[in-house]
Amino acid sequence: MDVKGVQGSISFDGEWITITKTPIGTRPAPARIRAADVTGIRMKPGSRLFHGYVQFVLPGSAPAEERKGLMAGGRPPYSDPHSLSIPRSSNDAAEKLMAAVEQARS
């Protein structure tokens, strides 16, 4: 199961969540998270004006704060390894991914 994000993607194989960000000029740096380790999932759907995001919360760490302002659109910073910005066209795929991760957690 894959979700195409803004400058990256999220994939889920039933046990592991892989967030691959593709910054300009460097190689992708994937972050792997075990679904059983996730304590919460935050999602803000993308709209016509702003991208949304999917963020995974892990035990012992606070979720990254949303940046305010016109350019940030209320998303966590790009440097947060546990989140990815998503366009409006990926909202349905992101909701399906969230449901699959929730099912794997329980």
Image (cartoon, rainbow, N blue to C red):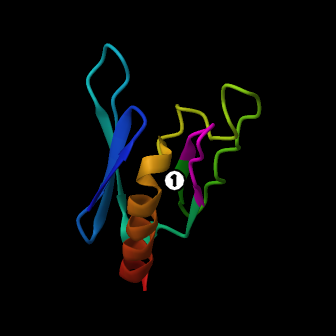
Look at mark 1 in the image and give the residue it sits on.
54
Q: Residue at x 63, y 37 (%)?
A: 49
Task: State the residue lying farthest toward the bottom.
Answer: 106
Residue 24 occupies which quadrant of the picture?
Answer: top left
List x then y, in percent, for residue 55.
Answer: 53, 53
Q: Percent x, y for residue 75?
A: 63, 41
| Three-letter code for the amino acid on which mark 1 is drawn | Val
Residue 16 image offset from top left, x and y in percent:
29, 63
Q: Is residue 45 visible?
A: yes
The N terminus, quarter of image: bottom left
Q: Which residues are magenta?
A: 43-52
* SS label for mark 1: strand
- Left or right side of 6 for 39: right
The residue lying furthest to the top in this view is: 25
Can you say which quadrant of the picture contains the C terminus?
bottom left
Magenta stretch encompasses residue 68? no
| x 58%, y 54%: residue | 45
Magenta: main secondary structure equals loop
Circle 1 packing at 10 Å, graded few (<14), some (14-19), many (20+), is many
Q: Which residue shows up at 50% across the image and 48% down it? A: 88
